[in-house]
Image (cartoon, grey):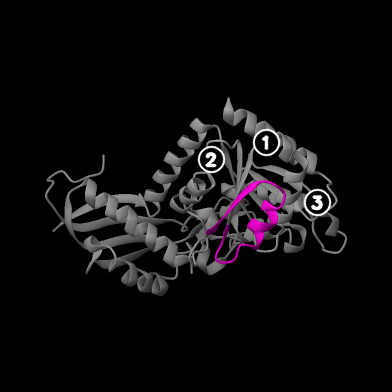
Amino acid sequence: MHEMGIVVHLAKTLDEFAKENHVTKIGSVTLSVGEVSGIVTDLFTDAWQYFSRKHPILEGAELRMEVIPAITYCDGCGKTYETATHGRTCPHCGSGETWLVQGNEVIIKEIEAETDDPNAVRN
Amino acid sequence: MKIIELKETITASNDRDAQNLREELRESGALLINLMASPGAGKTTLLDRTIRDIGTRHRIGIIEADIDSDVDARHLAALGVSAVQAHTDGMCHMDAGMTRAALEELGYGDKDLIFLENVGNLICPAEFDTGAGKNVMILSVPEGDDKPLKYPLMFRTSDVLLITKTDAACIFDFDFDKCEERARKLNPDIRIFRVCAKNGEGMEAWEDWLEEQVRGWRA
């Protein structure tokens, strides 16, 4: 249950951010989730619902997830292609010497929040 | 409500905790080695052999992380090193907070080398910085030479790859050169040792590396 561990850390990161920036309420959290990050979004949402109840600042906050498409680069021909469709083998030249450029990251993109601090940004 | 851009990785809070812990360990002179591998790869056997070989020259501590049970901690404590069992409460990895709690239970002020035997898993442990000074992974021959292709993050975050159970190479179709080439493509700086903890083959090079790191950490 890989998602649970990640949600625990997400909640902790948001808790700290809220304290530092005098955030009084979080309305929503938007994540950018790589297409091949290994996160199962349904499981992640379940874990979020469970853990957000334990962190008062997150209670009732909506979780939004945006997908970052996975793109692979081919060493053989120098072209890129969609990882999810073609996997590890380059559809242009058939080479297996290919590397993921993006798509395995999970980033907290933004939050909607009420704050007492007019310049609320982490320094 | 206003929108605040964070653009921060989801584990940012753990990354900060881990960095703080690493600095504290550096000051106290205790090198923490995070040992990661699949279940059954031979983490405990490798530690057993390493402790028998170099244990008298160092003040070693062991943290055994498992979802349940304390068989590994008891096994290693029988060799005369201090060992604590950390339970992860169902989590498939150790993070910096859990590692700190286990280190406090173990007591690290009087140690120079501490092994954290992470939960057997090639995925989650690679995602969470524990605060260790060095990350070491084991890939055992029976698991196959294709594992760098399947679990790239683990190979990218490890400073050392130990290919173990080399005595089983005649049974399994394991291509050492191919495996090493795949690992180096993901991580050009990775140090690779081929070892057999059972018959001791190759252990010296790994142990020399380890002792060099202990000296470097203290300096």
Binning the other alpha carbons within 10 Å of mark 1 as few (below 14), some (14 to 19) or many (20 upward) gives: some
Q: Position of residue B121 (x, y in %)?
A: 59, 62
Q: Residue at x 42, y 66 (%)?
A: A4
Task: Return the chain for callout 2.
Answer: B
The residue to which callout 1 is attached is: B58
Left or right: residue B155 versus residue A48 is: right
The residue to which callout 2 is attached is: B108
Q: Amino acid at mark 1?
A: His
Which residues, given as a range, are shown in magenta? B65-86
- Mark 3 / mark 2, whichever is N-terminal: 2
- Mark 2 / mark 1, whichever is N-terminal: 1
Q: Is residue B176 visible?
A: yes
Binning the other alpha carbons within 10 Å of mark 2 as few (below 14), some (14 to 19) or many (20 upward) gives: many
The residue to which callout 3 is attached is: B196
Mark 3 secondary-structure assignment:
loop
Total numbered badges shown on the rendered structure: 3
Judging depth in this view, the residue of B105 and A112 nearest the camera is B105
Q: Is residue B188 visible?
A: no
Gap between marks 2 and 1, in whole Å? Answer: 13 Å
